[in-house]
Image (cartoon, rainbow, N blue to C red):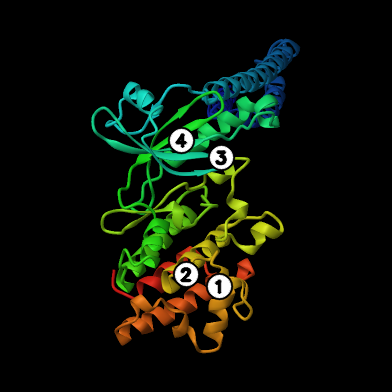
């Protein structure tokens, strides 16, 4: 009798250790059933065991109750999980905001709303909007990009404009979170019926395109050291977008007019990632775009590298890619092909901007930079280096 009691206590102790999770509970049921059968057999053989059939029926009822309880718990947990997921998804759905969304304490929303209607100075325009300068009441000068992604009669405007606007707003939130010394920070944005206003810091020096036009007109002198600093800053900005941002961000419209220069000629990339948000963007017509953009409308980080190679070629030669010079016989038809021909013929020095020729050490750096520009301008994306590889290539030319 004492041995039978000991065995019962052992069975109860073993059952109590199997209740941690649902999986372990199911395993416990199987074990419990087997152990109970063994105990019943021993009890039946014992003289002190009475009414074995009632005991067996009670055990079966307990097992059925436990199984039904487990199944009910699993079904309930599944239903609750589905409800929670639906609720969280609904709460996380980005509302379409109409008022000013600011990311800087310097800008008061009401002041910003009033200033947006005052286009003090037009800085540029494109098919998708305008770029102008304005001044807030507190004296802060800002640059405003007015985007008009929804043209009259477009499918986006009538069929799914809400989803498109929500997507644009979500992308703008991502762009506003970017922080790098070679990127223009998005300070605020405002959404109206069919347009967005994007607010940036105003850079007084202007764009690289403005600077190079002044160089060609002999109104500005840019030495090789300054030009190399600009190139290094541009590629570091691309490296941040391509390799630090998660998910990766492509610029999609890199060109001198989108490279702003501060007072120290430190470059800041503007309009990062915006072209993919604008259905009627003009990026496909840019002379700085890679061949694959025209051939099959594909775009990758190596397409950004091609655009960088064209900017580097402009800094080295001082020439505009749209110059009729490249259409003349023997000039290859484009700045990239012309520079590649000179480099392969060992005459790269002939292509350099005469205003930066000087010391022999600097000329050696320029000739190495020509080789880098040529490889960036390869027709096949796979033949171009990544922005991560280009940073050490350029920084090793000079100490930064």
The alpha-carbon separation of the residues under discs 3 and 4 comes to 20 Å
- Between discs 3 and 4, the one toward the N terminus: 3
Which secondary structure lies at badge 4? helix
Which secondary structure lies at badge 3? loop
The alpha-carbon separation of the residues under discs 1 and 4 comes to 43 Å
- Between discs 1 and 4, the one toward the N terminus: 4
Q: Residue at x 68, y 14 (%)?
A: 65
Q: Which mark, by number, is residue 159?
A: none
Q: Which mark, by number, is residue 128?
A: 3
The alpha-carbon separation of the residues under discs 3 and 1 comes to 30 Å
Mark 3 vs mark 4: in front: 3
Q: Which residue is mark 4?
A: 173
The alpha-carbon separation of the residues under discs 3 and 2 comes to 27 Å
Residue that protrudes farthest toward the bottom in the picture: 346
- Between discs 2 and 1, the one toward the N terminus: 2
Rendering coords of residue 222 (x, y %): 32, 68
């Amino acid at each position: 009798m004492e041995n039978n009691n000991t065995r019962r206590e052992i069975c109860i102790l073993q059952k109590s250790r199997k209740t941690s999770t649902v999986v372990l509970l199911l395993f416990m049921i199987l074990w419990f059933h087997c152990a109970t059968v063994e105990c019943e057999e021993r009890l039946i053989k014992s003289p002190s065991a009475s009414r074995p059939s009632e005991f067996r029926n009670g055990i079966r009822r307990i097992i059925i109750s436990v199984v039904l309880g487990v199944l009910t718990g699993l079904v309930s947990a599944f239903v609750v999980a589905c409800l929670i997921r639906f609720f969280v998804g609904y709460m996380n759905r980005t509302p379409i905001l109409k008022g000013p969304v600011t990311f800087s304490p310097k800008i008061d929303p009401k002041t910003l709303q009033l200033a947006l209607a005052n286009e003090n100075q037009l800085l540029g325009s494109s098919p998708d909007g305008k770029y102008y300068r304005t001044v807030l009441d507190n004296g802060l000068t800002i640059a405003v990009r007015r985007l008009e992604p929804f043209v009259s009669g477009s499918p986006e405007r009538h069929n799914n404009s809400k989803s498109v606007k929500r997507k644009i707003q979500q992308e703008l939130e991502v762009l506003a979170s970017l922080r790098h010394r070679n990127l223009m920070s998005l300070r605020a944005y405002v959404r109206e019926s069919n347009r967005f206003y994007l607010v940036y810091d105003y850079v007084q020096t202007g764009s690289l395109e403005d600077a190079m036009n002044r160089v060609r007109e002999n109104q500005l002198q840019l030495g090789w050291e300054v030009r190399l600093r600009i190139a290094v800053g541009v590629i570091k900005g691309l490296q941040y977008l391509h390799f630090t941002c998660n998910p990766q961000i492509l610029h999609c419209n890199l060109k001198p007019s989108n490279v702003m220069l501060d007072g120290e000629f430190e470059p800041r990339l503007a309009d990062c990632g915006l072209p993919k948000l604008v259905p009627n963007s003009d990026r496909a017509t840019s002379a700085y775009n890679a061949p694959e953009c025209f051939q099959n409308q594909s775009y990758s980080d190596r397409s950004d590298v091609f655009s960088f190679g064209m900017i580097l070629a402009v800094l080295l030669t001082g020439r505009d890619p749209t110059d009729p010079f490249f259409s003349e016989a023997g000039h290859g038809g484009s700045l990239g092909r012309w520079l590649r021909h000179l480099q392969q013929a060992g005459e790269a020095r002939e292509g350099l901007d005469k205003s930066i020729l000087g010391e022999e050490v600097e000329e050696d750096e320029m000739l190495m930079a020509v080789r880098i520009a040529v490889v960036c301008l390869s027709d096949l994306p796979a033949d171009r280096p990544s922005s991560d590889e280009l940073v050490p290539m350029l920084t090793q030319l000079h100490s930064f």
